[in-house]
Image (cartoon, rainbow, N blue to C red):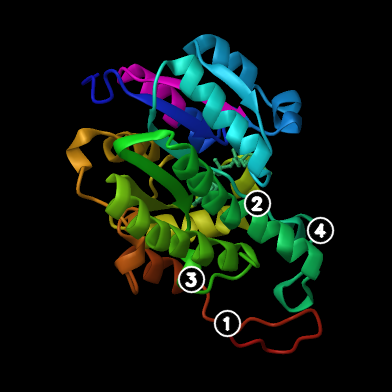
Amino acid sequence: MHNLLKGKRGIIFGALNEESIAWKVAVKAVEEGATITLSNTAMALRMGSVNELGEKLGAKVIAADATSVEDLQKVFAESVEALGGPIDFVLHSIGMSPNVRKHRTYDDLDYNMLGKTLDISAISFHKMLQVAKKMDAIAEYGSVVALTYVASQRTFFGYNDMADAKSMLESIARSFGYIYGREKNVRVNTISQSPTPTTAGKGIKDIENMMDFADKMSPLGNASAEECANYCVMLFSDYTRKVTMQNLFHDGGFSSMGMSLRAMNQYAKDLAPYEDENGKVIYG
Ligand SMILES: NC(=O)c1ccc[n+]([C@@H]2O[C@H](COP(=O)([O-])OP(=O)(O)OC[C@H]3O[C@@H](n4cnc5c(N)ncnc54)[C@H](O)[C@@H]3O)[C@@H](O)[C@H]2O)c1
């Protein structure tokens, strides 16, 4: 360990179980010398194993729905008190689409559910930043990071309304990053992570195929949750004090690729056109 976060105080939102990216970030942050609090919904605290993680890391666990401004005020107030001062870093590792859960396709969205997708997966990030700024709960040169996916910028079959949520999330990082940087030197960035086998990841249609494709397309292969945690720690550290308003790809090179040798080899195994159940050829 390098003590990259020695003496720093952080809040980690979104650890559900050992597979969660936020779980790995929490473990690494503490290993690197930080003290932290953990937050997730009351239901996630019941269903998951966050309380065990809290005990292991000596971290207070605070129940909060990230769409509730009052709950977020509570998280920041209790974290400042428990950790003994202003917060140096925050991880937003939250995503959920009721449309994906209910198998509603993108051309048959339920608009109430779309509202929930955007509120949980994107607007919660704005709420978090606005609450923290109004409470002056984040220290000078603090670092706020949210996790995103490349489907925000390019179309991926099956990612559905989460693509819209991720576009908004990345936009919020830029818009709020400008104001928070100008007034308080607080950094706001998003990390665009490879497909990863977590509870949220497994909710995406045909995630195994998507992961295999991304892996074959990426010169460095898919980035794991643990590697993502390392990148988060670096962004929380003082080594990235002038990095803000960025969407940073952590994807083994996937986002810059068009076609790779490995993907071409796989593709060459079957050149037959895709047909639906009625034998109709589908393009695209
Ligand atoms: N897994 C992937 O392939 C992948 C790829 C790129 C980005 N991401 C992003 O990483 C982040 C973390 O996801 P993960 O893959 O670790 O899965 P995960 O299922 O472990 O984490 C998602 C978390 O969101 C929390 N959450 C849902 N609704 C909430 C609410 N209303 N308030 C507070 N928390 C709420 C869940 O309880 C859960 O802890 C998400 O933003 C996800 O979109 C994941």
User: In the rendered structure, are the residues bearing label 2 and label 4 in contact, judged by CB atoms less than 8 Å apart?
Assistant: no
Q: Upstream in the sequence, badge 3 or badge 2?
A: 2
Q: Which residue is mark 4?
A: 102
Q: Foreground mark, 1 or 4?
A: 4
Q: Cα distance, mark 1 to mark 2?
A: 40 Å
Q: Which residues are magenta?
A: 25-39
Q: Foreground mark, 3 or 4?
A: 4
Helix, strand or loop status at disc 2: helix
User: Image point 39% across, 27% down: which residue?
Assistant: 86
Q: Cα distance, mark 3 to mark 4?
A: 34 Å
User: Image point 47% across, 73% down: which residue?
Assistant: 154
Residue 163: image location, x then y, percent: 57, 66
User: Image point 27% across, 46% down: which residue?
Assistant: 185
User: Image point 70% across, 26% down: which residue?
Assistant: 45
Q: Which residue is mark 2?
A: 120
Residue 29: image location, x then y, percent: 37, 25
User: In the rendered structure, are the residues bearing label 1 and label 2 in contact, judged by CB atoms less than 8 Å apart?
Assistant: no
Assess mark 2: CB under 8 A from ligand 1? yes
Q: Foreground mark, 3 or 2?
A: 2
Q: Quadrant of ligand 1?
A: top right
Q: Foreground mark, 2 or 4?
A: 2
In the image, which disc is placed on residue 269? 3
Q: Which residue is mark 1?
A: 272
Q: Foreground mark, 1 or 2?
A: 2
Q: Residues within 10 Å of mark 3 (few under 14, many from 20)?
A: few
